[in-house]
Image (tube, rainbow, N blue to C red):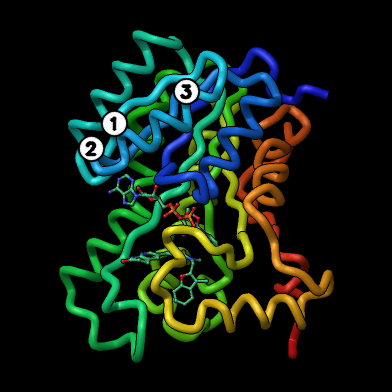
């Protein structure tokens, strides 16, 4: 069944073919959605354009979420091209590399604020900029989180605080936008080897822990996340809002 037939969607957060957002874009397109896929800056433009060229009818647009002017320009581009939006996928996070190892508390204020700006506040900024294009439709907004928001995952550090804020933002946005028929949810994914996971010390050890301790005794893939994403973006999830859906092979239920 094609779950997103006739729907228009925006996907933010594709960097390369390993990006979770790319798996979501591909799955959404297979389910009949017409997409605009953004790239952060020129550094990613060529790569993202090549990927998006493989999706029927899809286009790219630039958007650095730290820049209000770029969000405003994006709204105009979307309005001028596909006109309206039925869903928005936010799959963006960033912290300074040095703040993702060792103790958390030495982090300087400017880097703490920058991590929360890109990884949490940007969902608010994106929704505020694009909400007019979802007016009068049953819209769906989806973001990506990680269990480091709730439990201490060594080295995840400021990203854990940012994801805690992001998950709270999901709940407050769901309350704000529910009366307009717009749903807001998050997927809490298990660890996946992507660009954002590269250079993380002992990432392979984390993958091994999920492999041996999760109820399903396996790691999860971008495709696992994409299938859950299509569900949440579709009318199949018509009464689901403000939630965090775990796509983690069941890891989150474990004590030890
Ligand atoms: P990724 O590196 O492919 O995606 C991160 C994206 O964020 C990139 O496309 C990057 O361009 C974008 N980005 C960063 N700063 C930006 C800015 N200022 N403006 C616009 N875009 C910006 O890695 P990923 O693993 O696919 O990460 C996507 C999301 O999934 C993130 O929110 C991440 O926290 C979350 N997540 C990842 C994992 C994992 O293990 N990989 C697990 C759970 C959640
Ligand atoms: O959310 C994430 C990754 C977020 C992330 C990753 C990087 C690496 C490169 C944000 N900013 C940066 N900045 C960089 O310079 N994940 C859920 C994947 C992840 O990251 C970890 C993990 C896991 C899992 C970091 C430390 C410990 C575990």
Query: In the rendered image of this protein, does residue 225 appear above or below residue 64?
Result: below
Q: Residue 142's quadrant in the figure?
A: top right
Residue tagged 3: 53
Query: In the rendered image of this protein, does residue 1 appear above or below residue 21?
Result: above
Circles 2, 1 touching at the beta carbon (< 8 Å): yes
Report how far apart the C-alphas of labels 2 and 1 lie in the structure.
8 Å
**Residue 16 location, x and y as percent?**
44, 45
Q: Is residue 239 left or right of residue 73?
A: right
Between residue 91 and residue 123, name the one nearer to us.
Answer: 91
Q: Which quadrant is home to the C terminus?
A: bottom right
**Residue 182 location, x and y as percent?**
57, 30
Ligand 1 located in image quadrant: bottom left
**Residue 23 location, x and y as percent?**
59, 42
Near mark 1 (Cα within 10 A), the count class, few <14, some 14-19 or many ≥20, is some
SS of the residue under disc 1: strand
Q: Can residue 187 be seen in this view?
A: yes
Q: Which of marks 2 and 3 is nearer the N terminus?
A: 2
**Residue 114 location, x and y as percent?**
23, 61
Query: In the rendered image of this protein, does residue 146 appear above or below residue 158?
Result: above
Residue tagged 1: 62
SS of the residue under disc 3: loop
Residue tagged 2: 42
Q: Which of label 2 and label 1 is nearer to you? A: 2
Near mark 2 (Cα within 10 A), the count class, few <14, some 14-19 or many ≥20, is few
- Ligand 1 within 8 Å of the CB at mark 1: no
């Amino acid at each position: 069944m094609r779950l997103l037939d006739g729907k228009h969607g925006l996907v933010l957060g594709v960097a390369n073919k390993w990006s979770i957002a790319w798996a979501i874009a591909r799955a959404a397109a297979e389910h009949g959605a017409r997409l605009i896929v953004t790239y952060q800056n020129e550094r990613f433009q060529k790569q993202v354009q090549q990927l998006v060229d493989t999706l029927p009818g899809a286009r790219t647009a630039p958007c650095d979420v730290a820049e209000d002017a770029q969000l405003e320009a994006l709204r105009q581009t979307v309005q001028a091209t596909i006109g309206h939006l039925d869903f928005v996928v936010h799959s963006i996070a960033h912290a300074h590399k040095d703040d993702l190892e060792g103790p958390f508390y030495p982090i300087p204020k400017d880097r703490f604020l920058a991590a929360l700006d890109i990884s949490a506040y940007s969902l608010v900024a994106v929704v505020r900029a694009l909400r007019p294009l979802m007016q009068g439709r049953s819209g769906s907004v989806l973001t990506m989180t990680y269990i480091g928001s709730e439990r201490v995952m060594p080295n995840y550090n400021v990203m854990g605080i940012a994801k805690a804020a992001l998950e709270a933002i999901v709940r407050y946005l769901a309350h704000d936008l529910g009366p307009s028929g717009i749903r807001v949810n998050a997927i809490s994914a298990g660890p996946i080897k992507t660009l954002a996971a590269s250079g993380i010390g002992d990432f392979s050890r984390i993958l091994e822990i999920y492999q041996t301790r999760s109820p399903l005794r396996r790691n999860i893939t971008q495709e696992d996340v994409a299938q859950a994403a299509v569900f949440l973006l579709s009318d199949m999830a018509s009464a689901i809002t403000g939630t965090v859906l775990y796509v983690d092979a069941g890891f989150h239920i474990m004590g030890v």
